[in-house]
Amino acid sequence: MKWHSGRQLNADDVVWNLKRVCDPAIGSSMLGLFTGYLVEEYETGEKDDKGNPKKSSRLWSDKAIEKVDDSTVRLNASTPQIAVAEHLFHYPMFILDPQQNGSFGPAANGTGPFELVEYTVGKSAKYKARTDYWGDGPHLATFEFVDLGDSPGAGIAAMASKQVDGLSEADAVQINSMKAFPHVAVYKVETTQTIVARMHPEVEQFKDKRVRQAMRHAIDRDKIIQTVLLGAGTPAEDHHVAPSHPEYAALPKYGRDVEKAKKLLADAGYPNGFEYDMVTRPDPIWELNTAQAVAEQFKDIGVKVNIKSLPSAQYWEVWTEAPFSLTAWGHRPLAIMTLGLAYRSNAAWNESHYNNPEFDHLLTQAEGILDPKERSKVMAKIEAIMQDDGPIVQPFWRVFSTVMDKKVKGFELHPSQYIFAHQYGVEA
Amino acid sequence: MARYLIGRLGLMLLTMACASFLVFAVCEFTPGSVARKSLGPFATQQQVQLLMEKLKANDPLMVRYGRWLGVLLGLIPDPLQDPGTGLNFTDWRGKQYFGNFGYSTLNKLPVNDIIWERLGNTALLGGIAFLLIIPFSILFGVLSGLKEGGGLDRSLSVICITFTSIPEFASGVFLVTLFVILWPLLPGTSPLNTDAGWSLPSQLVLPVAVLVVYDFGYVARMIRVSMIGVMEKPYIRTALLKGMSTRQVVLGHALRNAMIAPFTVLLLQINFLISGVVVTELVFAYPGFGRLILEASLFGDVATIEAATLITVAIAVTTQFIGDLGYVLLDPRVRIS
């Protein structure tokens, strides 16, 4: 495996890259993924403006990332972790050239099938194929990303006049408008992208788990999928484990039951329901549409939800603090990855403030079981806890879709939304 | 005359300074930190803090404003270019020069590398639109103002009012449906990229059309009102009674007098065409100035926003100045004191 410059890739390069993303000063989100098994947080001894101790991160041991020989690197973890392969697949984990000090941009060295020849933020990125790629392909001479901006109509217009050969994403509404174009092919893939209406259990109204259960029984998932996603989704079961996850365990299904929900609310002390604000963001539009759909359905059990739509900039400042919020979660190939990030007590992105020691214990157990079938036995218990006691209402899993010109061959959609350009060809 | 010019120039600089400070202060209170937006929602808080320190974004407002002003005037070198920051930011023009707008956190490039090209693109779009708006609006305005309430006036007024009432995103989509999808004559977006085989002029047709359709009606209405007022004047009646043809009267007497008030309105359209065309730029994915300001504002890229503010204020003040000079030329009663 060679760099574009012709130099052989070796273990030193890999070790340098892995250590680099563990340095907090670099700002890589890989740091969050590695924390807990390769990286540990520690208190620096200083205090910040609010008097809280300042924290920093470091490798838990000098041997955490170990070069064994020129072509072997060993990761020595402090706790068992089955998602290592998935972490290394995460998009910020580029292998950059230590001799260029990790610079990224046109003329930067790399080991991939294409070289970046031009890169202008807000305009375009152009790639040129390399001739000595170690894998299959590439079958294209050049590849280009064009920034069409935020207007969804621009994507449709560009496909119509064949100015681009495909879009990186096309939602159900856009696909609907492009159905009539004879040269356009539609691609879809089931993902574990989802959205959760999560409630802080320490808040008065949401404290009783019967209230949370009532909220789960209030929604009609199929109806939401039809109206919001135009059918491009599959129902979710309020425990954030998807049928497409290898460790999924099937539990008895339940649907909308307004009577049961009202009874649960009454038992919890809210016979007439209550009113609450729900935070969401207006963009992408399907998130706001979901907020409106679930709010309508919550109304039917007596819970009046006021939607507070905050622009992205504001939203990301408060997304973990708002007591009731609708948050979209990205695709993760293993269920334990999201469960660990979102619902483990005191996890960095535990936006729902869920704190259940039994859940934590079962999750740690699951994280150490490599075989998905064995793991699903523990997952069944975790899923049951989430449906009984958990903080979320989860309506659906999204189907991700896009369009490509029919002349593009070899195109496949992957739930991670990666572009495997070395597999594509264009018919003359 | 020289004193007048220097006075106006001084006023322009004062306006620019006030506007730049106001914008700086407003950016202060918009939510969301630039570092958080650069690193994304999944970076840890400590990583965000580190980047804020590198960008010196935690310093008090006056310190940062003073630093920005100093860098702009070439009094101090840009501290962000110091290799010690680890930002890998370099400007081939140097660290300290007059007109150094600083570092764009959104584009990770010197502001000077991005803003002028974008401004040029919008100037091209706006310039062509302006050249079309002038004759169309004068034609419509003069013809409808000749005889108020006449058949011609009514029909032209309906056209003007209807077109001006249609918002740009609606007319943009409508034109794309007609000329891109139903009759594939023109490209649907205008990224100023000829790789797909569409020439640059063909990419300009639709965005210019949207701007002209939106704007000429408004100016035409102004000219119409002014024209009606002039046509009622006694000297016009005298000229007609003298035996001059309508054409001679209009071209020789009425037009110049009717254009005095609309002249300023026309010049104000320049301001709109430079910074207000963001909707058209969004619809057609046009790499212009309006889109740049929008993206920079949403991101909190203060350097780009400030640079854009200064440029827009300068353009606005200059067009006003040209307007005042134009008055002197058009109306002999007005003289600079």
Image (spheres, grey):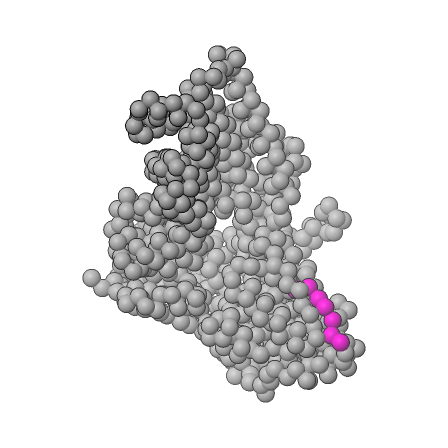
Q: Is residue B289 above or below residue A89?
A: above
Residue beneath the point at 35% across and 55% down = B176
Q: Is residue B164 left or right of residue A250?
A: left
Q: Quadrant of residue B28?
A: top right
Coordinates of residue A336 in the picture (x, y in percent): 57, 73
Coordinates of residue B269 in the picture (x, y in percent): 44, 36
Q: Is residue A293 above or below residue B123?
A: below
Coordinates of residue A390 in the picture (x, y in percent): 67, 75
Residue beneath the point at 79% across and 77% down = A269
Q: Nearer the viewer, residue B201 or A38?
A: B201
Residue beneath the point at 38% across and 58% down = A155
Residue extending farthest to the left is: A428
Residue beneath the point at 20% across and 62% down = A428
Q: Nearer the viewer, residue B188 or A81?
A: B188
Q: Is residue B229 magenta?
A: no
Q: Is residue A115 above or below residue A290?
A: above
Question: For the magenta stretch, what is the residue range?
Answer: A272-278
Residue extending farthest to the front is: B241
Q: Is residue B281 visible?
A: no
Q: Is residue A274 magenta?
A: yes
Q: Is residue B278 visible?
A: yes
Q: Is residue B104 left or right of residue A362?
A: left
Q: Main secondary structure of the magenta part?
A: strand
Number of marks drawn: 0
Coordinates of residue A265 in the picture (x, y in percent): 74, 79
Q: Nearer the viewer, residue B184 or B234?
A: B234
Residue extending farthest to the right is: A269
Q: Is residue B232 left or right of residue A253?
A: left
